[in-house]
Image: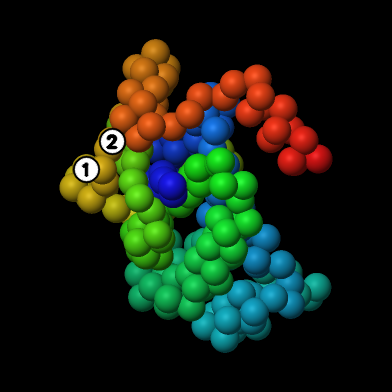
C-alpha cells in the first residue's frame, strides 16, 4: 500500500508523518529531502537546473544557490513550471526506487507538497490532504525557513489553496495545533486504511532491518 501526504507549505504535514511513523508500520519517504539530495553539485538534476536558469544559479564550487532559486521560482510562475517539468522526473524515479526496496510489511507514505503536480498521486492508493489556517501557515514558514513575512506570502501564494486539497484528496486533516484532534484524526484514518500499529515483534524486526 502507498499513501500520499500532501498540502501547501506550513500546513503541518511533518506532524502527521511523525505520528504515523511513531505509531504505525509505515516508512515515510520525504520528497523534499530527496530533492535536496538530488540537487548536489554535478547531478543531472542540477545540470538541468543550470540549463534553465544559467550558470549563475550555482556558486563557484558548483553548489546550487537555493535561496536565489527560491526567490526566482516563487516570483515567476513560468520559471517555476519549467523547473518542475524538468526535475519532477528525477524525484519520481527515486521515490519509486525507494518504494520497491521496502520490506513488504511496510506501508510507504510519500510526504510531498507537490504530490498532484508531480503525478505521484497516480502511484498512491490513498491521499491524505493536510490543511491549516493561512495565518498559522505563514507563521510556521517564517519560523521554519527564517524568511520574512512577505517572502512567506509569496511562497504560499504560489501553491494550491485548501479547497484544492479538499476536492482532490481522499481524506483531510486540519492541523491548527489542536493536537488531541490531530492524534484522533490520524488514528481514525489509519484504522480506515487498515494500517497495523507497531507491536513488539514488528519493532524488533524494523530495528534489525535498519541496522
Question: Residue 41 placed where, x, y %?
Answer: 73, 72
Query: Foreground: 27 or 130?
Result: 27
Report the residue at 57% width, 86% height from top: 51
Question: Residue 159 placed where, x, y %?
Answer: 34, 54
Judged from the image, the secondary structure of the residue bearing numbered disc 1 is helix
Task: Tell me if residue 33 comes above or below residue 148 in the rendering.
Answer: below
Quadrant (top left/top right/bottom left/bottom right) for the C terminus: top right
Judged from the image, the secondary structure of the residue bearing numbered disc 2 is strand
Query: Foreground: 1 or 158?
Result: 1
Task: Tell me if residue 209 comes above or below residue 176 in the rendering.
Answer: below
Report the residue at 22% width, 43% height from top: 166
Task: Tell me if residue 97 comes above or below residue 159 in the rendering.
Answer: below
Mark 2–mark 1 contact, CB under 8 Å? yes
- Sort mark 1 into few (<14), some (14-19) or many (20+) by Cα contacts within 10 Å: some
Question: Residue 201 placed where, x, y %?
Answer: 66, 24
Gap between marks 2 and 1 measured at Cα:
6 Å
The disc label shown at residue 55, or none: none
Q: What residue is shown with label 2?
A: 172
The disc label shown at residue 166, or none: 1
Question: Residue 47 placed where, x, y %?
Answer: 64, 81
Is residue 79 something that shows in the picture?
no
Report the residue at 50% width, 42% height from top: 107
- Sort mark 2 into few (<14), some (14-19) or many (20+) by Cα contacts within 10 Å: many
Query: Foreground: 151 or 117?
Result: 117
Amino acid at each position: 500500500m502507498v499513501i500520499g501526504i500532501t498540502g501547501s507549505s506550513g500546513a503541518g504535514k511533518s506532524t502527521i508523518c511523525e505520528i504515523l511513523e511513531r505509531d504505525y508500520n509505515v516508512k515515510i519517504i520525504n520528497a523534499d529531502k530527496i530533492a535536496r539530495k538530488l540537487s548536489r553539485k554535478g547531478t543531472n538534476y542540477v545540470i538541468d537546473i543550470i540549463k534553465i536558469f544559467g550558470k549563475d544559479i550555482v556558486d563557484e564550487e558548483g553548489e546550487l544557490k537555493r535561496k536565489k532559486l527560491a526567490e526566482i521560482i516563487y516570483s515567476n510562475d513560468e520559471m517555476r513550471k519549467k523547473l518542475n517539468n524538468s526535475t519532477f522526473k528525477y524525484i519520481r524515479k527515486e521515490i519509486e526506487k525507494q518504494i520497491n526496496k521496502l520490506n513488504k510489511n511496510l506501508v510507504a507514505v510519500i510526504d510531498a507538497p507537490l504530490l498532484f503536480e508531480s503525478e505521484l498521486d497516480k502511484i498512491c492508493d490513498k491521499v491524505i490532504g493536510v490543511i491549516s489556517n493561512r495565518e498559522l501557515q505563514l507563521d510556521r514558514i517564517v519560523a521554519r525557513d527564517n524568511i520574512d513575512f512577505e517572502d512567506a506570502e509569496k511562497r504560499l501564494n504560489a501553491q494550491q489553496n485548501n479547497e484544492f486539497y479538499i476536492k482532490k484528496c481522499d481524506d483531510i486533516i486540519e492541523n491548527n495545533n489542536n493536537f488531541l484532534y490531530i492524534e484522533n484524526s490520524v488514528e481514525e484514518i489509519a484504522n480506515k486504511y487498515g494500517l497495523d500499529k507497531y507491536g513488539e515483534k514488528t519493532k524488533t524486526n524494523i530495528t534489525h532491518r535498519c541496522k
